[in-house]
Structures are given as structure tokens and as C-alpha cells.
Amino acid sequence: MTIQQSLRRTAAAAAVALGFAAPAVAADLGATDEPIKMALLEWTGQHVTSHIAGHVLESMGYKVEFVTASNFGSATAVADGGIAATLELWDNNLGDFYPKLISEGKIEDIGDVGLTAREGWLYPAHMETVCPGLPAWDAFKDCAQLLATAETYPKGRLLAYPADWGTRSADLIAGEGLNYTAIPSGSEGALVAEMSSALEAKTPLVMMFWAPHWSLATIDAKWVDMPKDIVDKYSLQPPRTFKTVWPGMKDKWPAAYAFLEQFEITNAIQEPIMGAVDNDGADIIAVTKKWVEENESVWKPMVDKAMM
């Protein structure tokens, strides 16, 4: 038996063991005895994206391991080969570090992940009764005192992203001379919890947030209408979501590299799974594996194209 035949048999056997239909394998799988390490960053959507891709890679005959990392920590690890792939990066939360490593060829950008994304400042809809004129920008500026807390008085409190995600909210506030203070949140979960509390207690809140996110389908919240020049100046345009890999991946795991180039996910796929995990307490491995098992028609064409 040739090595290639053995690899094909390994891929088919692994797929059957996982309960997936075995893809037709033509490309070289590479080092199937070594795990492909993939980064898990700080938000649930990225975990969903990564686990779905990981289950498909397992169906192809690969071993997959997940490594918890920060945006910036994952950059160093991918450049060094300690992590093979980071899926779902947002180009407006990366600072200069990631783009520099990509431009130097130490990290490879392998294309968009497929999401339709949005970012901005979000508030509970009931705020419009105490801050007339919202979502208009001038109304938001005039309502700073309404959002003041003991921590920020006399300035309004704006709940920002976790510190590791960058400082765009603070930069915007400082650059435009707004009467607010940006307070970093601890995590994605902290942002969602604060919005839920504000909605329940009918208290004021403005926070940095993003779409797609499961909570937006369940809460009554609106976006502050920022002027276009501010959106452009502070990188709040619809962000690009993309995938990166260690450049050596194409040689070590050729078929896996080709699949990840093809791999995409949509808001419609990601949001219900995020909701199941964050809102219903579902196990992310179980729920993403179930999606893969039930949606072969979605991912198998990506595998087939990668194997050509």
C-alpha cells in the first residue's frame, strides 16, 4: 500500500468513526499524526467558527487541538508555528501588530470567513424616553450626564471592549472631545450581562458592541447614528472578518490548508449556535458537531473543492 493510499484510508476511517460521510481525498493530507492547533479567542462566535472547521478537519482524518489565546498572543503563536490557524479575526481590532506580521510574511491571510459584520455604540431602546433625539449623534453627545457614574462623574460612562481588543472607543472620545470616559469591560459576557441588566432595570447604558451576535435577536437595543467622517476616522466601518494561518501549514498539512482557504461561515449559521451556547448553556463541542453532522451539504463542497 502506498503512503497516499494509507492516508486516504485513514481519512475515510476517521470520517466514519465521527459519523460523517467520508470526502473523496485526492490532495495530500500531510502530517496526520501531529495535531493541527487552532486558536480560540475571547468571543463565542469565534469559538463556533473554529469548532465547526475543526470538526470538518477531523472528518478528513486530522487531529485537532484548540489553544486559548488573545488576539495579540495568537499572532505571535501563529508566526512561530505554535498555532497553525486563527479563524475569524476582525481587521479593526488588531492594531498594528497583526498587519505587520502579515506584511512580513510571518502570518498568511487566507481570505474572508464570510460573516456580515457591524460595530458601533449600542444602547437599550428605553433610553430614548430620557434622552430625546437618540439615535442622533448630537443627542448622544448631550446625554453624557445621564450616563455618569461614581467612577466617571461628571463625565458619562461608556462601556468599551475588553482592553486587549484595542482602544477605539477611548480614542474616539478623546479625539472628538466628548464628555465621556471609556471603561473597558472584562469580557464578551460582561458586555451582554450589562445590557441585560440595563434592559431589566430600565437604566441608561451605551456600550461598544458588534454583529453578528445572538443577543441582538433577543434584546430591544439600537445603534448610535455616528456621522460618516467619525466612522471612517475611527475604523468603525463594517469590518472585514478573515482567516490566518502559519505559512508552513501549506507544506505540513496541505489538504487542511486548502480546506481552510475554502472554509466560510455565515451569520445565519453562527448566531443560533452562539445563542444555544451563551443563552441556553449548550456544550459548544456537542452543538457544533451536531451542526456538522446535519449540514454536510454546506461544508462538503468546500472539502471537495479543496481536494481537487
Image (spheres, rainbow, N blue to C red):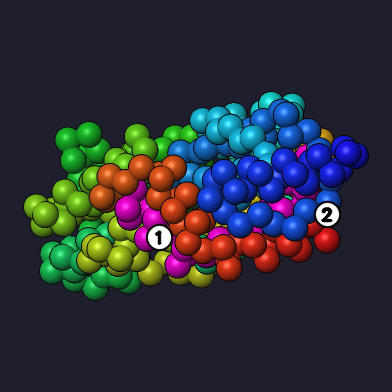
Classed neighbour count for the residue bearing mark 2: other residues with Cα under 10 Å, few (<14), some (14–19), many (≥20): some
Name which residue type carries label 1. Glu
Disc 2 target residue: 26
Between marks 2 and 1 in the image, the one whose residue lies nearer the viewer: 2
Helix, strand or loop: magenta stretch:
helix
Image vertical order of residue 187 relative to residue 121, above or below? above
**Quadrant that contains the N terminus:** top right
What residue is at 38 percent from the left and 69 percent from the top? 225
What residue is at 37 percent from the left and 60 percent from the top? 272
- Residue situated in front as seen by the camera: 305 or 74: 305
What residue is at 18 percent from the left and 63 percent from the top? 127
Task: Indicate the position of residue 46 as horizontal and vertical percent values.
Answer: 50, 47
Task: Indicate the position of residue 59 as horizontal and vertical percent values.
Answer: 62, 48
Name the side, left or right, on which 247 lies relative to 182. right
Task: Provide the secondary structure element on which disc 2 rests.
Answer: loop
- Residue situated in front as seen by the camera: 196 or 202: 196
- Magenta-drawn stretch contains 56: no
Real-space Cα separation, disc 2 to disc 1, in angstroms: 33 Å
Task: Indicate the position of residue 249 as horizontal and vertical percent values.
Answer: 78, 39
Name which residue type carries label 2. Ala
Q: Earlier in the sequence, mark 2 or mark 1?
A: 2
Task: Provide the secondary structure element on which disc 1 rests.
Answer: helix
Query: Can you tell which mark lies on residue 271?
Result: 1
Query: Can you tell which mark lies on residue 34?
Result: none
Image vertical order of residue 7 relative to residue 26, above or below? above
Give the magenta range: 253-277
Report the number of numbered marks: 2
Name the side, left or right, on which 294 lies relative to 235. left
